[in-house]
Amino acid sequence: MRIILLDGKGREHELEAVEGWRVMEIIRDYGFPIVADCGGACACGTCQVEVDPAWAAKLHEPREDELDMLDQNYGGEWSRLSCQLIMTAELDGLRVRLSDIAIREAA
Amino acid sequence: MTQETISTDVVIIGAGPCGLFAVFELGLLDMKCHLIDILDKPGGQCAELYPEKPIYDIPALPVVSGQELTERLMEQAEPFGPQYHYNEMVEELEKLEDGRFRVKTDGGLVFEAKVIVIAAGGGSFQPKKPPIPGIEAYEGKSVFYSVKRMENFRNKKVLISGGGDSALDWTINLQPIAESMQLIHRRDGFRAAPDSVNKMHALVEEKKMQFHLGQIVELHGDNGQLTGVTAKGNDGNNYEIECDTLLPFFGLTMKLGPIANWGINLHENLIPVDTEKFQTSEPGIFAIGDINTYPGKLKLILSGFHEAALMSQAAVRHAYPDAKVTFQYTTSSTSLQKKLGVA
Ligand SMILES: Cc1cc2nc3c(=O)[nH]c(=O)nc-3n(C[C@H](O)[C@H](O)[C@H](O)COP(=O)(O)OP(=O)(O)OC[C@H]3O[C@@H](n4cnc5c(N)ncnc54)[C@H](O)[C@@H]3O)c2cc1C
Ligand code: FES
């Protein structure tokens, strides 16, 4: 099972995913500089990704609190919070791009 | 306007859970506290980021919401008469010749205290800025992240961006005095009181304001004075909106803020402390909760509570070197129970 991640510079990375894990956790555990301040509690909006439109329909609809966080963080049409996306077999090959707000600047 | 200086034992910077519990621990040792927070309420992250979410790892409270935890901490601190100063950001912290400290806020409050406790968490809560290129040039002139005086918006062509309570409340409140009122939001759903949403829709019906779907992508104007914006609609097409004032309301985020200018050692935006006193590089200035760092630190409320207890022992010795501090239990000490108002 894998995720295709496009980083801030548009480079493509193939990540090994684990069923039942949040996409945010997989990105974070690979060591990408994802902000994800609240650790997946849907309370910060800084794990935002843009989902490849071809995959968008395969995802469950965002809940009200996810929509709220996307509102507060300038989400676009294909934006989702990666902490609210749980890996399942149907999502094998999911393509997402890290949004600017989710990239931790080097200190 | 000159303000009277407030003299006290302790100034606590930040009224999050750790700052609140410090009032209790310091109070047991007879130390009087003033708390300052830039938020308009106590509770820090618990109140601002997750008031309704359950917390499961507070000892003896199997489940408690962020809001309820805050209320209980306030109740526990109450016997010690803490003074709260909200909507104030601590800007300056300096040492006085007599060994005490002076604290100044952006609102002009001045404090002098024997001990400072920095319980600033992830930093001060500040408005999130939308990522629109060049927006800085307009900030404070025609782009504002909060409304301090409504009068400043009289006869303005106001555009408000956002979909939460602040966006809707200010849309409704400023509409009667503004020359024109427009609201832009990325979807036709709001996270706000249903009553406000209905009021806004009614104003649109009555043609007293306009509502746009989409997001601002570009600002137009000169020398910081806005003349309009380009917005991108959900159909992907751009359109223009005329306005001379923009109020973006995208919630709050935590920024370290002025702490970096206070002359204490920082490490990656955190304050290193020892684990006996939780003291910073400056004797008399302590740091507890999420803002501090030491080997093995866990950013948990539980850890902050422990830090508050040990810090208080050191703080009282710093403030009153001659005082005799004896270790007592709240269950059995009459003197502690008197302080708590239960004996
Ligand atoms: C979504 C989420 C879920 C969490 N769940 C848990 C959990 O289950 N269990 C747990 O133990 N922890 C949890 N935490 C972490 C916990 O909330 C923090 O550890 C805790 O809030 C830290 O408390 P604090 O008092 O140190 O700081 P904060 O709560 O961050 O409060 C600091 C306050 O200081 C103010 N401040 C800072 N600088 C200034 C200044 N210069 N002037 C004025 N005011 C200032 C800020 O505005 C803020 O209100 C969670 C956090 C989040 C975001
Ligand atoms: S990690 Fe905070 S919202 Fe996803």
Image (cartoon, helix red, strand yellow):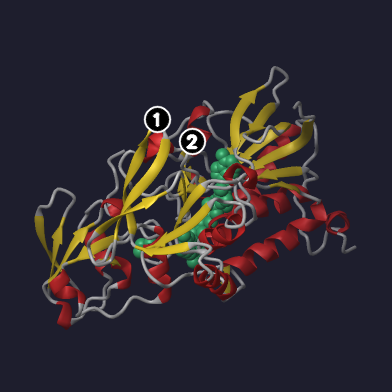
**N-terminal label among 1 and 2:** 2
Q: How far apart are marks 1 and 2 (CA)?
A: 9 Å
Identified at 48% across, 35% down, the residue is B141
Judge whether residue A2 can be spotted in this image.
yes
The residue shown at (37%, 60%) is: A45
Occupied quadrant, residue B64: bottom right
The residue singled out by tag 2 in the image is B141
Q: Mark 1 lies on which chain?
A: B
Figure quadrant of residue B239: bottom left
In the picture, measured across the screen, residue B274 lies left or right of residue A41, that is right
Is the CB–ligand 1 distance for label 1 below 8 Å?
no
Mark number, residue B30: none
Point out residue B130 in the picture as x, y percentages from the top left corner: 38, 49
* Image location (x, y in percent) of residue B123: 50, 44
Query: In the rendering, at what x and y percent does residue B158 appear?
Result: 49, 50
Amino acid carrying label 1: it is: Asn
Residue under the image location 45 percent in, 40 percent down: B270
Mark 1, Cα crowd under 10 Å, few <14 / some 14-19 / many 20+, is few
**Can you say whether B308 is above or below B61 in the image?**
above
Do marks 1 and 2 both belong to one polypeptide chain?
yes
Where in the figure is residue A7, as x and y percent of width and height? 17, 53
Check the image and report above or below for B86 versus B250.
Answer: above
Q: Nearer the viewer, residue B332 or B187?
A: B187
Q: Mark 1 points at which residue?
A: B223
Name the element at disc 2. loop
Q: Which amino acid does label 2 sit on?
A: Lys
Out of B63 and B309, give the one closest to the viewer.
B63
